[in-house]
Amino acid sequence: MSALRLPRLPDRSPVKITITLAPDLHRHLSTYADLYREHYGDTESITELIPFMLRLFLETDKAFVRTRTRTPS
């Protein structure tokens, strides 16, 4: 069998977690969701926004990115 150009796809099974937020953080996230709606015209729940916010945070944290590029996943 010849080698395929496309490697095996990574696990894409979602992982559900439960977190507890401080009231002020919840208010900030609610405000952010309101601003998102005003800016884009789309209503997204906090639970829909959080994964994207976390991904953006991790992708733009220079120290984390530096460490990830040195450490294979």
Image: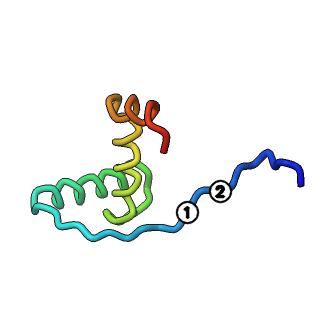
Left/right of residue 7 with respect to residue 73 in the rendered view: right
Tell me the CA gap for discs 2 and 1.
8 Å
- Residue 63 place in picture, x, y as percent: 32, 30
The residue lying toward the viewer, choosing from 9 and 47, is 9
- In the picture of the structure, the residue carrying the numbered disc 1 is 12
Question: Amino acid under label 2?
Answer: Leu
Q: Residue furthest front?
A: 1
Image: 3 above or below 43:
above
Residue at the image point whose x is 34% and y is 65% from the top:
47
- Name the kind of residue labelled 1 in the image: Arg
Please, what secondary structure does the residue beneath circle 2 have? loop
**For this rendering, which residue is in front, 42 or 45?**
45
Name which quarter of the figure residue 68 lies in.
Answer: top left
Q: Residue 48's spot in the image, x, y percent?
A: 39, 63
Q: Residue at x 34, y 57 (%)?
A: 50
Considering the image in quadrants, where does the N terminus appear? bottom right
Residue at the disc numbered 2: 9
Label 2: how many Cα within 10 Å (few below 14, some 14–19, many 20+): few
